[in-house]
Amino acid sequence: MENEQYKINKLKDASNWDIWKFQIKVIMNAAEIFDVVTGKSKKPILAKIGNETEDGERKRHSVDFSIWKRADNKAQKCIVTSLDEQPLQYIMNCDPANGMWNKLLSVYEQMSDTSITIVQQKFYRYTMDPKDNIAGHISKLENLSRQLK
């Protein structure tokens, strides 16, 4: 991932959230860092045995922490470099990558009664755009349907 360049549109606001989220998930899964973002891979904690920790345990923790930190740094870079200014302001005080991801989820995936009603109205009023082919039309309908789940 470090040497690979990906061209995706930056997250601007809720209007391109779904596409951005899909692209960023694929990129991070390919780089094997998405588990850090979701919190599935947690920051290693050094377990104390009595008042002291054994040297072997300390060394294992150091290696585990180094691996986790490297993945977290890559994930943070991936997130931060793919955000426009407004979304970037939401996460400036978040750390680690999991905190950034959760903040973005809380901002863009909140489904209040009002937003559900708006999406329902869009769904029921939706008509095929003459510029779209049938696959594009179905994709837009599926997107609206997914937003309602």
Image (cartoon, rainbow, N blue to C red):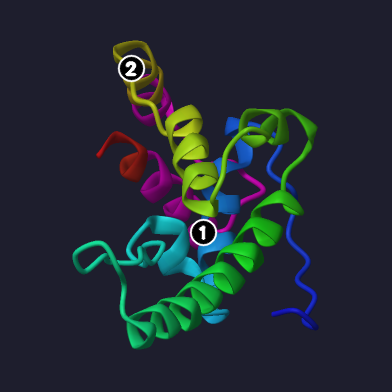
Q: Is residue 101 left or right of residue 46?
A: right
Circle 1 sits on which residue?
A: 22
Dot 1 surroundings within 10 Å: few (below 14), some, or many (20 or more)? few
- The structure residue drawn at horizontal position 49% and vertical position 59%, both measured from the top left corner, is 134
The quadrant of the image that shows the C terminus is top left
Q: Secondary structure at mark 1?
A: helix
**Quadrant of the rendered image containing residue 126:** top left
Residue stretch rendered in magenta on the structure: 121-144
Residue tagged 2: 112
143, 25: nearer the viewer: 25
Query: Could you tell me which residue is drawn at 52 percent across and 79 percent down?
Result: 67
Membership of 70 in magenta stretch: no
Q: What residue is rendered at 37% in x and 30% in y? A: 123
Query: Residue 109 got which mark?
Result: none
Horizontal and vertical percent position of residue 65: 48, 72
Q: Tags 2 and 1 in contact by the CB under 8 Å rule?
A: no
Compared to residue 38, the image places residue 6 above or below, namely below
| Numbered disc 2: secondary structure | loop
- In the image, 86 versus 89, the foreground residue is 89
Residue at the far top: name it: 114
Of residues 136 and 6, the one nearer the viewer is 6
| C-alpha distance separating marks 2 and 1 | 22 Å
Q: Amino acid at mark 2?
A: Ser
Crowdedness of circle 2 by 10 Å Cα count: few (<14), some, many (20+)? few
Q: Which quarter of the figure is the N terminus placed in?
A: bottom right
The residue positioned farthest toward the left in the image shown: 50
Residue 128 point in image, percent of width and height: 51, 41
Residue 88 visible in the picture:
yes
Q: 23 above or below 127?
A: below
For the point 49% across and 28% down, the residue is 107
For residue 30, side relative to residue 139 (left or right): right
Residue 27 in view, yes or no: no
